[in-house]
């Protein structure tokens, strides 16, 4: 079994590396540049558990420590970093397959793992340095060990989950309810193992509080992610977003519809077979065979039922003899495992949706990644209740839709990191950084994070030298009321603004939708040009995203026609070289 899983990991790893090959040399994106890479670099250079290159947020140090070890072995580069994260995502896919085999058929578990790997959110996150995918790996391993009753390994996996990201601690109440309600666990040693993962998180919180005076985060972080979120509107918006992330975004609506069709088909089939069984029993009479209806499985494992020629696969025949009794015991054990898994999976999804509806200022879909493996096993298992040919056709259609969703952006604002739009963002910012380095003198460049960090920190991969930057919070009209002094303005599309934006299509509902989804459109570039007497210096566009660089005509030598102005051909050549 271990040899097969190792071979499966190598195969998945090679497959994902090949698919991500054009992305491996990309500079770091958004929160990677803002926190995770500086934190890992601090650990790599100085063994600091709490970073100083960036604002500490209270996240546990497992992922920075892992990247530090990779850099120590292979050098600190974008390629080494992204391949290291692909190793995590590949292990998550293989673990999903292993867990799926415990509760459903081999084909269904393979489908679950494959669709998980191809789903746009998971695929995009597979090479990015965030914490949620690592938490997903160890959470899935913890569920697997808990189902198998290997509680020491559960304690280790769950401890690594909470050291990846502190929010993974919500797994523990689900595990405790499972142990008390489903397994009737009474052993002290078992409960010690079940409670053990809380200890490393508590130790980390004590250490962090000793060093910073806060139990987690910093004042701004706590205000944004906790205090400001405890309002009915934010909770409602977050709850709707979390449900949409599971059941509709990125062609997940097609996945949910196929699963619903499987459930309906299975229920109808079950009623038909019950009617047939009653009719057959009335004709045969007692004494020949006594048919007992097996418990309806929540999964479509067609190859795991008792083989009986000419009989329905959902009927168990109770006959004399040892072999049928052993087979019936096998089926009941598997049904119990499936039921236990369903309890854990539904519980885990419920606590994550509840928690992330209350905490977290940014409503990012990647925060739900720790539940994706068990969610895909559940939902794909329901699809396999359909006839085999139909289920296979739907799985292939879903795989094609998911691959399409890597490139198809939705008709409403969404985080670029939800699909490969993040790569377009990074490549545009590479071009902008190259162009800004050609500006004569040392102009002060006004822009918003994360571009501020991209221009200040050469180790992020955008610039060769540190540029002078003035920062504003964003590009909304409010942000430009009293901006700091600047010589050049670096504007870019911070949020996806499709031509047919659903949030602006209905004028009567626009104020309500903007408030519900915290939508704030960017300031008009034309209005900024007039107000600050700006001259367009350079602009780039890529698949609906854009970058514009302006100079202040009255204060700068950067206006077109000045001898120091770089010719367009030279600008384009420099901006494009190394943007791959």
Image: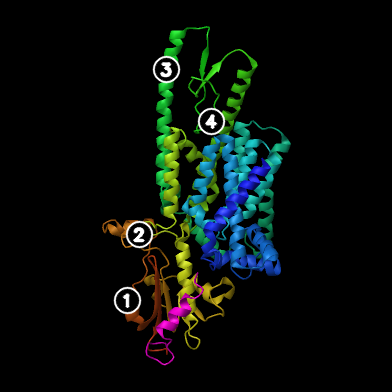
Distance Cα–Cα, label 2 vs label 4: 50 Å
Residue annotated with mark 1: 527
**Picture layout, residue 125 above or below residue 577:** above
x, y percent for residue 417: 48, 60
Label 1 secondary element: helix
Q: Which circle's residue, 4 or 3, is located before the other in the chain? A: 3
Distance Cα–Cα, label 2 vs label 1: 21 Å
Callout 4–callout 1 Cβ contact below 8 Å = no
Label 3 secondary element: helix
Closer to viewer: mark 2 or mark 1: 1
Query: Relative to the observer, which residue lies in front, 138 or 190?
Result: 138
Closer to viewer: mark 3 or mark 1: 3
Q: Which circle's residue, 3 or 1, is located before the other in the chain? A: 3
Distance Cα–Cα, label 3 vs label 2: 56 Å
Q: Which mark is residue 514?
A: 2
x, y percent for residue 69: 69, 62
Q: Which mark is residue 276?
A: 3
Q: Which mark is residue 303?
A: 4
Relative placement, left or right, of 519 versus 112 is left
């Amino acid at each position: 079994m271990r040899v097969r899983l190792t071979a499966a990991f190598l195969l998945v790893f090679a497959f994902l590396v090949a698919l991500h090959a054009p992305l491996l040399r990309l500079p770091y994106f958004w929160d990677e540049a803002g926190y995770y890479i500086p934190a890992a670099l601090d650990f790599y250079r100085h063994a600091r558990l709490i970073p100083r290159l960036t604002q500490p947020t209270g996240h546990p140090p497992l992922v920075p420590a892992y990247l530090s070890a990779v850099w120590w072995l292979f050098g600190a580069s974008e390629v080494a970093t992204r391949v290291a994260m692909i190793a995590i995502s590949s292990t998550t896919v293989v673990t999903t397959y292993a867990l799926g085999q415990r509760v459903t058929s081999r084909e269904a578990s393979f489908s679950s793992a494959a669709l998980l790997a191809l789903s746009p959110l998971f695929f995009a996150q597979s090479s990015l340095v965030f914490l949620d995918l690592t938490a997903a790996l160890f959470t899935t391993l913890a569920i697997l060990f808990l189902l198998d009753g290997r509680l020491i390994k559960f304690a280790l996996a769950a401890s690594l989950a909470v050291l990846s990201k502190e929010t993974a601690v919500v797994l523990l109440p689900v595990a405790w309810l499972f142990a008390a309600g489903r397994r009737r666990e009474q052993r002290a040693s078992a409960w010690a193992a079940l409670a053990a993962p809380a200890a490393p998180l508590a130790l980390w919180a004590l250490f962090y509080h000793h060093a910073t005076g806060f139990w987690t985060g910093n004042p701004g972080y706590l205000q944004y992610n906790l205090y400001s979120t405890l309002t009915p509107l934010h909770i409602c918006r977050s709850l709707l977003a979390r449900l949409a992330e599971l059941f509709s975004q990125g062609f997940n609506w097609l996945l949910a519809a196929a699963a619903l069709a499987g459930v309906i088909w299975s229920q109808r089939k079950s009623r038909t077979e019950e009617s047939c069984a009653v009719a057959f029993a009335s004709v045969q009479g007692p004494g020949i065979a006594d048919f007992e209806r097996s418990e309806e499985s929540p999964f479509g494992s067609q190859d795991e039922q008792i083989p009986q020629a000419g009989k329905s696969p959902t009927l168990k025949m109770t006959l004399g003899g040892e072999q049928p009794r052993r087979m019936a015991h096998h089926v009941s054990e598997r049904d119990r495992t499936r039921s236990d898994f369903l309890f854990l999976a539904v519980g885990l999804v419920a606590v994550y949706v509840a928690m992330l509806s209350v905490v977290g200022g940014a409503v990012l879909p990647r925060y739900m990644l720790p539940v994706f493996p068990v969610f895909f096993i559940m939902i794909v298992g329901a699809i396999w209740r359909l006839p085999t040919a139909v289920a296979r056709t739907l799985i292939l259609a879903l795989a094609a839709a998911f691959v399409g969703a890597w490139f198809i952006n939705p008709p409403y604002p969404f985080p670029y990191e939800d699909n490969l739009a993040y790569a377009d963002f990074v490549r545009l910012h590479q071009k902008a950084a190259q162009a800004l380095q050609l500006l004569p003198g040392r102009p002060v460049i006004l822009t918003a994070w994360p571009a501020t960090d991209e221009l200040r920190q050469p180790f992020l991969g955008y610039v060769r030298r540190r540029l002078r930057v003035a920062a504003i919070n964003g590009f909304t009209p409010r942000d430009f009321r009293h901006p700091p002094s600047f010589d050049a303005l670096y504007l870019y599309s911070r949020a996806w603004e499709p031509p047919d934006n659903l949030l602006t299509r209905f004028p009567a509902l626009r104020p309500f939708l903007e408030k519900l989804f915290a939508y704030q459109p960017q300031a008009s570039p034309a209005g900024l040009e007039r107000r600050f007497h700006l001259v367009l210096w350079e602009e780039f566009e890529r698949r609906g995203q854009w970058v514009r660089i302006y100079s202040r005509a009255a204060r700068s030598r950067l206006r077109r026609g000045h001898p120091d102005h770089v010719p367009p051909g030279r600008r384009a050549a420099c901006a494009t070289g190394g943007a791959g």
